[in-house]
Amino acid sequence: PMARWTDFLQRLRGDSRDAERQRWLAILGLNRQLAGADGRAQVLTVLVDEAVRLFGAERGFLLRRADGPPGFRVEIARSLDREPVQSPERKVSSTVLMRVLQHGEGLFSEDAQADDLAAAQSVADLRLRSVLCMPLRVGDDVLGVLYLDHRFRAGAFGEADLPWLMAFADQGAIVLHLHDLLAENRAQAERLAEQNRSLQATVEAQARALAEPAPAPG
């Protein structure tokens, strides 16, 4: 929504630190990369790679909401060296993801081993330290989550990172939404084409039946 972007820009203009300016310039560069990317996977990979780099994360994931357990699926999973993360479904905290999906708000943890996330089994199993997440929203709908983490350093992220991550998440949400619309349009076109083929076959069958001579009266 426009109000979220307005709030983000107001925060941006009020901060003259060089690191913040560099993030702004990177987002502008990201927009150009997204515009020139070929296909959904490439667009989202660029987005996650840039988020990992700019926020100093160890790993980055873009996840979609999904029906049935565990309630999400991994679209993109990238490491700091811009390589795919293997078995990504096992590398993210389901507790963190479901909290963001259910509440639709961003979340960060300076040390997940010491705050209220420490009790979560997934956080303990993954030995997470720093976590930064933001929902991908289109209107009131939450399509997924942009999830960054660092297993070896506490304090990697802070509350000031949330509005910046929101800018990335909003871009990811737009990409997903547009590709969902394109897929829906293709599916509708295919259904319409099938209906037209069925109707044409029916018309042709009726035409053949009408062209056949009527049976002679017995």
Image (tube, rainbow, N blue to C red):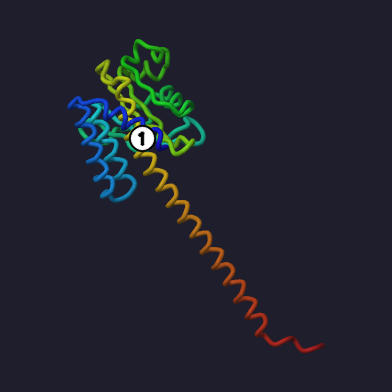
Residue furthest toward the left?
A: 18
Residue at x 21%, y 26% (from the top left corner): 16
Q: Position of residue 4 (x, y in %)?
A: 39, 33
Q: How many marks?
A: 1
Quarter-wise, where is residue 28 in the image?
A: top left
Q: Hey, what amino acid is under mark 1?
A: Trp
Residue furthest toward the right?
A: 218
Quarter-wise, where is residue 96 in the image?
A: top left
Residue at x 26%, y 20% (from the top left corner): 156
Residue furthest toward the top?
A: 114
Q: Position of residue 10 (x, y in %)?
A: 32, 30
Identify which residue, 212 or 117, lies in the foreground. 117
Secondary structure under tag 1 reads helix
Q: Position of residue 204 (x, y in %)?
A: 59, 76
Q: Dot 1: within a 10 Å radius of its alpha carbon, few (fewer than 14), some, or many (20 or more) residues? A: some
Quarter-wise, where is residue 126 in the image?
A: top left
Residue at x 27%, y 15% (from the top left corner): 154
Residue at x 63%, y 80% (from the top left corner): 207
- Horizontal relation, residue 17 to residue 7: left or right: left
Quadrant of the drawing holding the C terminus: bottom right
**Circle 1 residue:** 5
Identify which residue, 104 or 41, lies in the foreground. 104
- Horizontal relation, residue 193 to residue 107: left or right: right
- Horizontal relation, residue 117 to residue 148: left or right: right
Is 132 drawn above or below residue 62 in the view shown?
above
Identify which residue, 208 or 5, lies in the foreground. 5
Quadrant of the drawing holding the N terminus: top left
Is 184 drawn above or below residue 50 in the view shown?
below
Q: Position of residue 200 (x, y in %)?
A: 57, 72
